[in-house]
Amino acid sequence: MKFTKMHGCGNDYIYINGFQVKVDNPAQLSIKMSNRHFGVGSDGIVLILPSDVADFRMRMFNSDGSEAEMCGNAIRCVGKYVYDNKMTDKTSITIETLAGIKILDMTVVDEKVTYAKVDMGEPILKAEDIPVISDKSPVIGEEIDVNGKTFEFTCVSMGNPHAIAYVDDTDTFEVEKIGKLVEIDEKFPKKVNVEFAQIIDNETIKMRVWERGSGETLACGTGACATLVASVLNNLTDRKAVVKLIGGDLLIEWDKESNHIYMSGEAVTTFEGEWLL
């Protein structure tokens, strides 16, 4: 089975062309292929599939086999894959996800996509829709006790749930120690992605992320979007800011008129290979 390894800001997935091959057990395949010692090594796998309601459909599975609703870094790479492999000649396409249909506008250089802007839709702020067990709406300053310390989280869904806390220094913060406990906290019925953010100025945010089902990753597109929303709700930044992740930068904008979030960033093909089933 042929595959393509791609990344957006170091958030790396294995892409499989579902037009050419049928994957019977994608959850199990993701566990095997994602293993960085015995497999290819990745944060998960992404299946590119036909859609009845959009140009393409994507399904994505984390490295633990769980299916995720959406990934902002992965969807940019889906756009690059279908354009670079001549599955479309359009530079603006729609992609069906479990979090709804997303619109991509792609930048092409020498017949290859290098950069993509994604309309991520509106942020979800109602507690029961995120979901998070809270009597606040929007959920700002939700206190969670972890390892004897109390953290205040702002909760946002971008089609998948996020909890954002602000810290003094992301470089030294114990992301794994705290993140893995918050992920499974009883306040989050479907678990949660956890972001730890540091405000540099009103147009710049540093962030590290503990992804539900994958652990710490180098970047998370939906997490960057959720973090900007949280920062605006907490009056910490403007509605447009650069989110600096370990793997690179994403430009995030929360448009006031449409209430939509726009995410812009790179999409990179690393290599192609064949998985010997």
Image: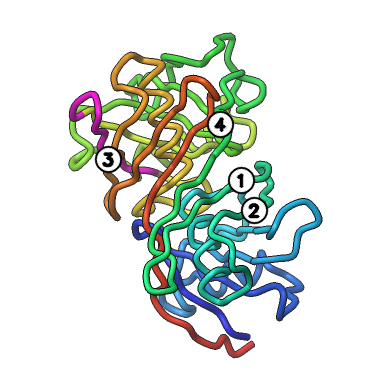
The nearer-to-camera label among 4 and 1 is 1
Considering the numbered disc 3 on the image, is that residue within a helix, a strand or a loop? loop
Query: Residue 42, labelled with which disc?
Result: none
Q: Where is residue 164? Give x, y as percent.
A: 40, 29
**Of 96 and 148, which appears nearest the observer?**
96
| Residue at the disc numbered 2 | 95
Q: Where is residue 67? Give x, y as percent.
A: 64, 54
Residue type at numbered disc 4: Ser
Residue type at numbered disc 1: Lys
N-terminal label among 3 and 1: 1
Q: CA distance from mark 3 to mark 4?
A: 24 Å
Task: Please say if the residues under marks 1 and 2 sit with CB atoms less than 8 Å apart.
Answer: yes
Residue at the spot x=33%, y=34% of the render? 196
N-terminal label among 3 and 4: 4
The nearer-to-camera label among 2 and 3 is 2
N-terminal label among 4 and 1: 1
The nearer-to-camera label among 4 and 2 is 2
Screen quadrant of the C terminus: bottom right
Location of residue 277 with respect to 46 vertically, above or below = below
Label 1: few (<14), some (14–19) or many (≥20) C-alpha neighbours in 10 Å: some
Query: Residue 157, labelled with which disc?
Result: 4
N-terminal label among 1 and 2: 2
Q: CA distance from mark 4 to mark 2?
A: 19 Å
| Residue at the disc numbered 1 | 102
Residue type at numbered disc 2: Ile
Question: Magenta span covers which residues?
Answer: 200-209
Q: Where is residue 54? Give x, y as percent.
A: 72, 53
